[in-house]
C-alpha cells in the first residue's frame, strides 16, 4: 500500500524535485554525511553495549555507480534502520524544523531554511526519479525496502540484507538539454565530489574503479579509497583552505551561511586536545528559545563520544559550534561520568579564553563583522553578565556594545571611558524604546551638550549595567536619575534656594497628584523642555516598564520625582498661581504637566479622559 508523506515533508520534497538548490551535486555530500552518522552511531553503541563487537576498520561507505542501469548506490554498514525508523525518518521531515517550516513555507527564504534543518535525505530527489532504501537495523534480523518516486508517497516492504546497514539506490533522472545526470555515474566526477565535500569523513569511502591495463590489454578493477579520512580538525590550519572550513561547517552544523570566524586550536600538555570552533554569522531560528541546545561535539581519537557536550561551553558562548577531540577522554566514558569530569573542565576553561580572545580580535580588527555578530548574539553576552550576578563581568564587559549619543553608532565601554571629557566621572546612559525616542527625552538635551550618553534600547540593558555596578571603577548613571547633577556650585546653590522657596507650592502640587510622585521640584537638567520625570533609588522608570512584563514584577515601582524646568515660563506661571492662591488651577496645571511627563517617558495615563478635558478647558479660556 502506498503511504503519503507528512504534509510538510511533501512540500520540501516538491521543492527538491523541482530542485531549487542550484547546487544539485550536494545530494552526495548529504547522503554520505548520513552514512557517516550511521557509522558513528554504531560505533557509539558498541562503546556502551559490550555485546556488540565492531572493529572500526570494518566500517565503510561504498559508492557503486552502474552505467547500464543508470543507478548510483551508496552503501554503509552502520546502525541501519528498523521498519518503524524508515517510516519515521524518511516519511517525515526533520522533526525540529517542521513547526517553523509550516510558518515559513511561503517564499524564497525557504531555501535557506531548508539548509538549517538538513533535509539531507530528500536532496536525493534532485537527481533521481526513484529512490530505494534497503536497511537493516543492528537491533533486528529483518531488512526492509523503502521505495519512493517522490511526491506520490512511498512504500515499505520486506527485503534482504546480510548484516546491519543501509543501501540507497538512486535511479537517476533522464538527461535533459540543460542537465546531465550521467555525470554522477562517472568515477572521476564522484571522486572529485568526495574530495570536495566529504574528504574529512573519518570512515573510508570506497569505490571499485576499473581501467585498462595497457600492457595486458585488459580491464582491471581496483578498490579505491576516495577520501583522505583525516578529520579536518586534525589538519594544520595552514593546510586547510577557508572554503574547506566553511563547507565543513555548513555541512556539519546545518547552516546555510559560512561562519563568521573559525577558531582552530591544538593544545599539547597535561591535557591535550584539538578543537575546531565556529562562530556562526547569524543566530539559528530557535537560538533564543528553550529548544536550542548548546554544546560541542566531543571526540576521542577521532571517534564521536557525544554530539552536544554542553559542559564544554559556558552559557554566554552558547552560540559557538564545533568539535573537540581529546585523547585524554576515555572512549568508554559514559554520559553520566562526563559531568564533573576534570579534563572537560580544563578544556572548557581554555576554550572560553580562546573564544573571548577571538571575539576581542574581531571587535578590534573587523568591526563590521563584530557588529553583525553582536546584533545577533549580544543579548546572550549581556545575559551572561546579568544571570551570573556579575561573576562573568571581567570576561564579558569589553565585548559589550552600546549605541552612543554622538553618532548613534556602537561604542564599547573602553572607547567611551577613554574619550570622557575632563571632569567627567560617570558613564551616562539613557533608556528608551528606540534611538529616536531617547533623543527626544527632555533630559537628554542638556546632558548631551556636555557628555556622551549611551543609548540603551533593549529593556535588559539597564539591568546589565546595574549588575556590573561600574566599569573599571567608573560608575554608571541613568540621566533620568534624580541625582543627575550638571550644575556648578553656584548654580546648585541658587537651585537649592528656589526649591526651598517653593517648598509649600510643591507639597500642594504633590497633593494634587494624590501622592503619585515622591516629590515635585525645580531642575536645571532641562534646556527647552518644561517637565520631566526622574527616578530615585534602585528602580528606574525603564526598569519598572521591563519588570511589569515579567512574572512577579508587577508590583515593583520606581520612585518618581516630577522635575520642572526652572527657566521655563511655566515655572513662573506656577509660582504666580500659587501666589494668587488659585489652588484649583494650580492643581489642573500640575495634572497636565504630570501627564505630559508620563507620556514623554512612554508611560500610560490612568486618567486620559480627565486630562483631555482639562486641556480643553484651558484651550477654551
Ligand atoms: P538529518 O540527517 O538532518 O536528520 P535526513 O533527512 O538526512 O535528516 O535523514 C533523516 C534521518 O534518517 C536521519 O536523522 C537518520 O536517522 C536516518 N537516516 C538517513 N540516512 C541513514 C543511513 N544511511 N543510515 C541510518 N539512518 C539514516
Image (cartoon, rainbow, N blue to C red):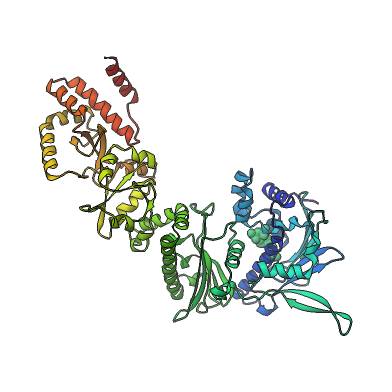
Does residue 141 show up? no
Residue 156 in the image: x percent, y percent?
78, 57
Residue 161 in the image: x percent, y percent?
78, 69
What residue lies at 38% left-to-right and 39% top-to-bottom? 436
Q: Is residue 195 above or below residue 417?
A: below
Residue 481 in the image: x percent, y percent?
25, 44
Does residue 271 show up? yes
In which quarter of the view is residue 55 placed? Answer: bottom right
Q: Which is more toward the observer, 412 or 234? A: 412
Q: Is residue 213 left or right of residue 580?
A: right
For the C terminus, give its image quadrant: top left
Q: Is residue 384 left or right of residue 215?
A: left
Q: Is residue 323 above or below residue 83?
A: below
In which quarter of the view is residue 548 placed? Answer: top left
What residue lies at 13% left-to-right and 31% top-to-bottom? 502
Residue 201 in the image: x percent, y percent?
64, 71
Amino acid at each position: 500500500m502506498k503511504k503519503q508523506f507528512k504534509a510538510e515533508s511533501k512540500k520540501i520534497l516538491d521543492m527538491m524535485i523541482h530542485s531549487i538548490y542550484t547546487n544539485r551535486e550536494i545530494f552526495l555530500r548529504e547522503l554520505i554525511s548520513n552514512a557517516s552518522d550511521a557509522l558513528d552511531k554504531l560505533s557509539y553503541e558498541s562503546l556502551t553495549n559490550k555485546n556488540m563487537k565492531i572493529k572500526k576498520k570494518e566500517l565503510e561507505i561504498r559508492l557503486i555507480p552502474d552505467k547500464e542501469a543508470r543507478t548510483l548506490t551508496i552503501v554503509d554498514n552502520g546502525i541501519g534502520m528498523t521498519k518503524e525508523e524508515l517510516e519515521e525518518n524518511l516519511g517525515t521531515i526533520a522533526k525540529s524544523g517542521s513547526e517553523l517550516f509550516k510558518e515559513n513555507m511561503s517564499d524564497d527564504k525557504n531555501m535557506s531554511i531548508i539548509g538549517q534543518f538538513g533535509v539531507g535525505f530528500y536532496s536525493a530527489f534532485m537527481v533521481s526519479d526513484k529512490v530505494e532504501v534497503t536497511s537493516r537495523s543492528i537491533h533486528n534480523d529483518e531488512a526492509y525496502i523503502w521505495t519512493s518516486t517522490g511526491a506520490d508517497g512511498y512504500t515499505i516492504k520486506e527485503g534482504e540484507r546480510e548484516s546491519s546497514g543501509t543501501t540507497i539506490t538512486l535511479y537517476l533522472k533522464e538527461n535533459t538539454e540543460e542537465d546531465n545526470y550521467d555525470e554522477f555515474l562517472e568515477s572521476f566526477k564522484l571522486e572529485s565530489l568526495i574530495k570536495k565535500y566529504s574528504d574529512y569523513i573519518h570512515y573510508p569511502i570506497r569505490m571499485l574503479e576499473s581501467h585498462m591495463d595497457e600492457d595486458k590489454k585488459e580491464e582491471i578493477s581496483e578498490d579505491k579509497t576516495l577520501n583522505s579520512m583525516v578529520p579536518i580538525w586534525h589538519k594544520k590550519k595552514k593546510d586547510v583552505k577557508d572554503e574547506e572550513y566553511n563547507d565543513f561547517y555548513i555541512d556539519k552544523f546545518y547552516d546555510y551561511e559560512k561562519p563568521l570566524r573559525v577558531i582552530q586550536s591544538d593544545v599539547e600538555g597535561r591535557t591535550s586536545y584539538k578543537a575546531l570552533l565556529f562562530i556562526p554569522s547569524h543566530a539559528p531560528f530557535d537560538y533564543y528559545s528553550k529548544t536550542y541546545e548548546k554544546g560541542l561535539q566531543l571526540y576521542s581519537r577521532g571517534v564521536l563520544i557525544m554530539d552536544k557536550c554542553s559542559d564544554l561551553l559556558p552559557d554566554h558562548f552558547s552560540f559557538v559550534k564545533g568539535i573537540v577531540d581529546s585523547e585524554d577522554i576515555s572512549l568508554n566514558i559514559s554520559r553520566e561520568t562526563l559531568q564533573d569530569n576534570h579534563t572537560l573542565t580544563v578544556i572548557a576553561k581554555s576554550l572560553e579564553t580562546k573564544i573571548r580572545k577571538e571575539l576581542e580580535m574581531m571587535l578590534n580588527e573587523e568591526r563590521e563583522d563584530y557588529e553583525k555578530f553582536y546584533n545577533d548574539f549580544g543579548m546572550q553576552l549581556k545575559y551572561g553578565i546579568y544571570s551570573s550576578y556579575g561573576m562573568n563581568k571581567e570576561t564579558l564587559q569589553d565585548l559589550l556594545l552600546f549605541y552612543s549619543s554622538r553618532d548613534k553608532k556602537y561604542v564599547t565601554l573602553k572607547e567611551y571611558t577613554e574619550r570622557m571629557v575632563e571632569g567627567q566621572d560617570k558613564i551616562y546612559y539613557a533608556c528608551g524604546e528606540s534611538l529616536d525616542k531617547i533623543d527626544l527625552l527632555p533630559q537628554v538635551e542638556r546632558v548631551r551638550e556636555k557628555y556622551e550618553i549611551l543609548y540603551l534600547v533593549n529593556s535588559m540593558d539597564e539591568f546589565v549595567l546595574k549588575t556590573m555596578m561600574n566599569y573599571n571603577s567608573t560608575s554608571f548613571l541613568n540621566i533620568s536619575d534624580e541625582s543627575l547633577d550638571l550644575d556648578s556650585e553656584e548654580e546648585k546653590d541658587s537651585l537649592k534656594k528656589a526649591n526651598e522657596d517653593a517648598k509649600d507650592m510643591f507639597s500642594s502640587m504633590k497633593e494634587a497628584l494624590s501622592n503619585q510622585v515622591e516629590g515635585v521640584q525645580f531642575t536645571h537638567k532641562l534646556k527647552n523642555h518644561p517637565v520631566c520625570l526622574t527616578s530615585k533609588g534602585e528602580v528606574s522608570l525603564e526598569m519598572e516598564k521591563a519588570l511589569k512584563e515579567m512574572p512577579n514584577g508587577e508590583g515593583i515601582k520606581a520612585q518618581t520625582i516630577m522635575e520642572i524646568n526652572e527657566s521655563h515660563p511655566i515655572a513662573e506661571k506656577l509660582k504666580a498661581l500659587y501666589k494668587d492662591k488659585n489652588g484649583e488651577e494650580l492643581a489642573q496645571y500640575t495634572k497636565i504637566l504630570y501627564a505630559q511627563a508620563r507620556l514623554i517617558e512612554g508611560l500610560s495615563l490612568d486618567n486620559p479622559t480627565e486630562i483631555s478635558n482639562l486641556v480643553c478647558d484651558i484651550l477654551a479660556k
